[in-house]
Amino acid sequence: MSDSTETTTRNIKLVIAYNGAAYHGWQRQADNLPTVQQAVEDAAAKVMGHRVVLHGAGRTDAGVHADGQVANFHTPNMAIPLAGMRRAINSKLPGDIAIRSAALAADEFHASRSAVGKTYRYRIFVAPAKPVSLHRQVYHYPFHALDVGVIQNAAGRLIGTHDFRGFATSSDQRDSTVRTIFRCEAAEWGDEIHVTVQGDGFLYNMVRNIVGTLVEIARGHFPPERIDLILSSGDRADAGPTAPPDGLSLVSVYYD
């Protein structure tokens, strides 16, 4: 006698890495512009034998990269082992996208709604020579010397629960602009400065606006206390410019 509660679908959790330089962001576009979501969905559909709809943890913008984007999809295909599934999907993806892992998730798992935090990293290349081998993977900033100690001082002021409206792009229409930043720090890596930000959520262009402001502070245009002003005023005009997408990468997504 069969069990009427027997599972008839699997919820598959993917961890995906990609170089976003050639794509118009993560999310599938109505006008069929190339996106990471579309590339992975199309590759997965060929392997699974049915249309695949991915739910991504974050809608990275055009030109933004990922080391640990998370997505999930449901499939009635119970036959393909997870390791074989990952290999098969990877074989049908372009060289700038890779499935790092495929795992079985609880049926209620949703890559975006279940997430409790994310880490982003921004890479600033500060040497005078153009980094050709890192084209569109870093933000090349040859104009002024940037003091990483000053960046670290300013970045630390962002830690905690604040209203980040002043660091959000005006087109962000979310009801609440309050977020909690657990970690915000800068470190030198050879010719690069890496700014790492970890929080429970992020507004549209929030990390790029933070980095643009930190660069203005590091070159002496603003004092580190400018961060306090932006947080208290909530005025985007008080912050620095939006840093280019090239240096930004979604490092990881966290779940309970």
Image (cartoon, rainbow, N blue to C red):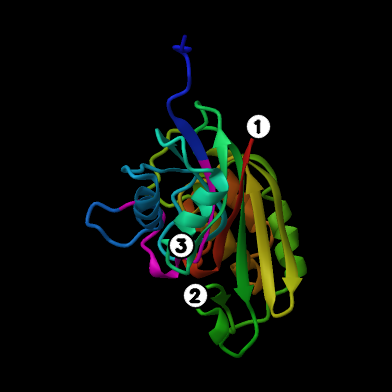
**Mark before the other along the chain sequence, 1 or 3:** 3
Q: Residue furthest front?
A: 1
Identify residue for label 2.
Answer: 136
Identify residue for label 3.
Answer: 91
**Mark before the other along the chain sequence, 1 or 2:** 2
Q: Nearer the viewer, mark 1 or mark 2?
A: 1
Q: Of 18 and 58, which appears nearest the observer?
A: 18
111 part of magenta stretch: no
Q: Residue at x 45, y 50 (%)?
A: 204
Query: Percent x, y for residue 193?
Result: 68, 71
Alpha carbon distance from label 1 to label 3: 31 Å
Which stretch is magenta?
13-28
Alpha carbon distance from label 2 to label 3: 25 Å
Is disc 1 in contact with disc 3, using a CB cutoff of under 8 Å? Answer: no
Where 188 sits versus 62, above or below?
below
User: Looking at the rendered structure, which numbered label has been put on residue 126?
Assistant: none
In what element is the residue under mark 1?
loop
Classify 10 Å Cα crowding around label 3: few (below 14), some (14-19), many (20 and above).
some
Identify residue for label 1.
Answer: 256
Q: Quadrant of residue 194?
A: bottom right
Q: Amino acid at mark 1?
A: Asp
In what element is the residue under mark 2?
loop
Q: Amino acid at mark 3?
A: Ser
Classify 10 Å Cα crowding around label 1: few (below 14), some (14-19), many (20 and above).
few
Drawn side of residue 162 relative to residue 235, left or right = right
